[in-house]
Amino acid sequence: MDELIYAANTGFALTGGLSAAAANVIDEFGTEESKALYLEKIYSGRWSASMCLTEPGAGSALGSLRTQAVKIDGTADRYKIEGGKIFISMGDHDLTENIVHLVLAKTPGAPSGTRGISLFIVPKFKVNPDGSLGAHNDVVCTRIEHKMGIKASATCQLAFGDNGSCEGILIGKENHGLPYMFRMMNEERIAVGLQGMALASAAFLYARRYAAERKQGAHWMRRRDKEADDVAIIEHPDIRRMLWWMKSHVDGMRALLLTTSYFTDMSYAHPDEDERRRFGGFVELLTPICKAFCTDRGFDATILGIQCLGGYGYTSEYEAEQFARDAKIGSIYEGTNYIQAQDFIGRKVPMNGGQVLMAYLDVIEEDLKKAEADAELADLAKKVRDAKAETERAVVHLAGMEKDNELGFQTFLHATDAVSMMGDLCVAHLLTTQASSPHKKLPPPAALT
C-alpha cells in the first residue's frame, strides 16, 4: 500500500509515514504515561509527528548538535528545550490538531559527541494530563524550505524555546537518544528505499504508456524504407532497452524491499530465538542496501523515463520530470547514500566477524543451486553465482582494509561501489529465484513483447 501512496505523491505521503515511525519509538521506549497521551492520537491520524535531528552547520554530524535540554526541578522526565532544527519534514502545517516532534538534544554535562544525545517528545501544543490540548509549546516555524521536489511535504525550519517556555518529555534514559532514534531512522531508511522504487515504478509505467501511444519513425526492420509508416516508439530498440532496464530494476528492488520486510517480521515473530537473531542480522545487513541502492537506481530509472519521452519529458506539462525531482531527495535524506555505504562496509560487513554476511550469501547460494537444476535457468544461475563470488571477494577485501591508516581511505573511496555491487547481486538473486517459480511458465506481458 505504501508503494502506491508514494508513487501517487511522495511529498504528501511523508505525513503518515513519519507519524507511524515516531509513534513506534514512543511505543517501544516511552513511559506508560507518554504512551497513553500520544499513541492513540498519532496512530489514528488526529495528530501527526516529525523527527528533528538536523541543525544548521551540523547536518549529518549529529554529535555537533547544540539544542539544549535542562531538567525542570521537581519533575521526573520534564525538560526545558532550547535550540533550532532545519529540514524538518512535515515540521509545521494545519492538517492535524497537534504535531508531536521527536527532538534530539543534549543535557548539561552530557558526554561529548553522539554519546551525549538524548531524545525528547516535544509537542507543538502542550498536552494536559487528561489528553486535551493546552497552551502553545513555544515551537515556531521560522522558515519554509523551497525545494527541488517533494513540494507537498511541508519542510520547515523550527525554533524551540525562543521565549523560554518549550517543554519536552524524556524518552527512556538520558544520553541514550541516538539508539532510540535509530529505531525510527532504520525504519525510515527502508521506507526511503521504497520511495525510490515507487517513483521508478511510476516513471516506468508512465513511460511505457507514452511509448505505446507516441508514433514516430519507421520500424527498425524497415528503416531504409522511405515509404514506411511511423510506428509507436516502443517498437524502437533503444526505447525497449530503457523500458527493460527500468522494469527489471523495479521488479528487483520491489523483491528486495519485500524480502527485507519479511525478515523484519520474522525478527520479531519467529518462535525460535536463534532464528529471530538471524533474521534481525539480515535486516541490519540489508537496510543500507535498501536505502542506497534503491534510491540511486530509482533516480536512474526516473531519468530514463524522461529520456523515453524525449523533449516532452523535459517539460512540466508531463509528469516525468516530477518523478525525477521527487526521487533525488532519496539519496540525500535519512543519512546520505555515502553514509549508508560507510555503514555497510565499515559496520555491516564485519558484523559478528562477518558471519551475518556469510549467512546471507549462503541463502543466495542455496537458491541458486535450486535454479541451476532448471535447464532453462542453469546459465543464468551460474552467472549470478560468479557475481556472488566476485562480490564476496570485493566487499570482504574492502572491509578488511578499513582499520589500516594507509589503506582505509581505499575502503571508503570504494564503499559506494561495494553497495552497488551488493545491490546488483541481491536483485539478480531475487529475480533468478522468481524465474524459478511456476510463474515463469506464464507468457510475458503483451505490452513489452
Image (cartoon, helix red, strand yellow):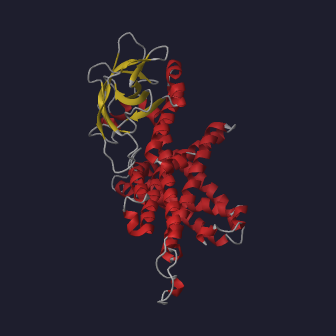
- For image coordinates 52% across by 65% down, the residue present is 208
In percent of width and height, residue 104 lies at: 37, 31
Q: Nearer the viewer, residue 54 or 133?
A: 133
In percent of width and height, residue 432 lies at: 63, 63
- For image coordinates 34% across by 42% down, the residue present is 60
Q: Nearer the viewer, residue 359 or 435?
A: 435
Q: Is residue 346 left or right of residue 381?
A: left
- For image coordinates 26% across by 24% down, the residue present is 162
Q: Nearer the viewer, residue 13 or 273?
A: 13
In this view, the residue farthest toward the top is 74
Q: Quadrant of residue 264?
A: top right
Q: Is residue 28 above or below residue 268?
A: above
In percent of width and height, residue 326 lies at: 41, 52
How many numbered badges does the structure rendering display?
0
In percent of width and height, residue 407 lies at: 36, 57
Quadrant of the snapshot with the C terminus = bottom right
